[in-house]
């Protein structure tokens, strides 16, 4: 355990846990980062009803905050403020320390009523339609949005462990020989799987406008197109692959297709066999594109407790109940800042990384609307939020809760 004061180190970048679905709308630059860190909020709205979720079926122990070195009054205070709507539309708050559940709260919202203020055209990519968002058909399965990307990366790691994918630096274009490709720009021929994983594809892509913008936002255009793969492959090149970070949901779709080609299975079935079943995850939903491809950029739905299992498994370096699900080597490589966005924030293999002088302080799965799994290895904490905050801003920002509220009480 490092001897430094983790509170002091985290406070310098408490606002760096940036929601991926919002982040994916911005081509990262230092100029933007300095603004985003202080303005981004990913949980907005009000809470109407709450209950303590006592169905723990994790195979883990439950414990009190005090027993795990956390001030219970702080947890109670955060819970109360979430109930009051201070942090917006939060659907679930779950905290694990030392492998034990110390807080697990569900908050019920009337999304059918809330959605009436917006366009409710029934479409799986209309984020205001209550049949689809944030829950799948009013079930307990919650939209994960870009958290899906990180889970796809974990599944790719399993495929690499098993020898289906042999080299991250191989060109990807040969995988797409069945598609109509314009290869007049040699830069497209040099795109590698590593470039896709680290969002350095070189493909011209812009997600900076609203996701309701059907004319400018490349992600929205892709999601409304008939052939997502062809759409991404048709995009012109902008830079040399491997030289510039541009958040691009389309490249995560390409990763899913490569997985299908190399393993011979659609990624939802691969996930069911290689990840969900070993972790005891029996319920999920995964959106499909019009061509029948699995949506690996944002289409997965899980229960929050099952999402926490994946987070805890990664904290344990790929192991779950003495079974190695994905190799420790892949986890270690995935959470290294392959791209350094500034001196504190990096991007790994579809992971957001908070680091300091070579030490990983936190690594995060993040998605539009307030989906977040944050892993704090020094404190042995896994924090999970689900929410649906896509309109307006909340009074307080939930991405500060751990650093500003919980961390100072940990002993």
Image (tube, grey):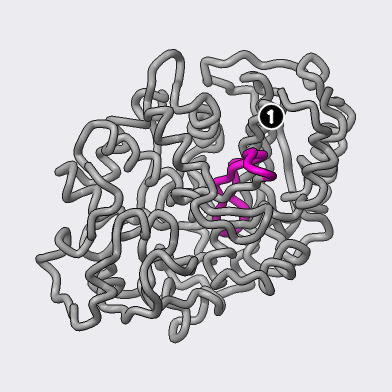
Magenta residue check for 367: yes
Residue 385: horizontal and vertical position, in percent?
64, 43
In the image, residue 217 lies at what x, y percent? 47, 78
Q: Residues within 10 Å of mark 1 (few under 14, many from 20)?
A: few
> In the rendered view of the protein, which quadrant contains the N terminus?
top right
Q: Which residue is located at x 58 percent, y 45 percent?
A: 364
- Which residue is depicted at the point 80% across and 51% down? 12
Residue 67 left/right relative to 342: right
Seen from the viewer's position, the closer of residues 26 and 186 is 186
Tally of numbered tags: 1
Majority secondary structure in the magenta region: strand
Instruction: Pick whichever, 116 or 272, lies toward us.
Output: 272
Where does the magenta region start and end? 356-374
Q: Relative to 183, is 20 above or below? A: above
Residue 34 lies, in percent from the top left, at 73, 67
Q: Nearer the viewer, residue 243 or 219?
A: 243
Q: Which residue is mark 1?
A: 378
Quadrant hosting residue 393: bottom right
């Amino acid at each position: 355990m490092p001897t430094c004061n983790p509170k002091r180190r985290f406070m310098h970048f408490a606002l760096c846990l940036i929601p991926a679905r919002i982040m994916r709308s911005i081509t990262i630059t230092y100029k933007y980062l300095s603004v985003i860190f202080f303005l981004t909020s990913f949980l907005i709205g009000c809470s109407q009803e709450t209950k303590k979720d006592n169905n723990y079926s994790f195979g883990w122990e439950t414990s009190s905050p005090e027993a795990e070195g956390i001030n219970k009054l702080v947890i109670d205070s955060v819970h109360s403020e979430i109930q009051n709507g201070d942090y917006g539309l939060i659907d679930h708050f779950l905290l694990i320390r030392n492998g034990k559940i110390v807080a697990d709260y569900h908050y019920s919202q009337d999304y059918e009523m809330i959605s009436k203020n917006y366009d409710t055209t029934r479409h799986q990519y209309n984020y205001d339609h209550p049949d689809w968002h944030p829950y799948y058909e009013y079930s307990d399965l919650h939209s994960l949005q870009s958290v899906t990307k990180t889970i796809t990366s974990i599944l790719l790691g399993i495929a690499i462990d098993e020898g289906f994918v042999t080299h991250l630096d191989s060109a990807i274009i040969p995988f797409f020989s069945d598609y109509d490709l314009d290869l007049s720009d040699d830069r497209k021929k040099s795109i590698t799987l590593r470039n896709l994983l680290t969002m350095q594809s070189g493909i011209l892509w812009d997600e900076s406008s609203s996701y309701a913008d059907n004319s400018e936002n490349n992600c929205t255009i892709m999601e409304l197109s008939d052939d997502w793969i062809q759409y991404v492959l048709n995009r012109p090149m902008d830079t040399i692959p491997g030289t510039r970070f541009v958040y691009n949901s389309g490249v995560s779709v390409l990763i899913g297709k490569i997985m299908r080609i190399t393993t011979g299975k659609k990624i939802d079935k691969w996930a069911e066999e290689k990840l969900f079943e070993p972790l005891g995850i029996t319920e999920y939903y995964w959106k499909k594109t019009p061509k029948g491809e699995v949506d690996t950029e944002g289409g997965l739905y899980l229960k929050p407790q099952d999402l926490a299992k994946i987070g805890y498994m990664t904290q344990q370096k790929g192991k779950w109940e003495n079974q190695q699900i994905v190799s420790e080597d892949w986890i270690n490589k995935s959470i290294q800042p392959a791209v350094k966005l500034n001196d504190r924030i990096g991007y790994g293999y579809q992971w957001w990384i908070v680091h300091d002088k070579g030490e990983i302080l936190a690594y995060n799965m993040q998605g539009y609307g307030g989906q977040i799994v944050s892993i704090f290895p020094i404190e042995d904490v896994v924090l999970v939020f689900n929410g649906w905050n896509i309109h307006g801003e909340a009074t307080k920002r939930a991405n500060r809760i751990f650093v500003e509220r919980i961390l100072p009480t940990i002993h």
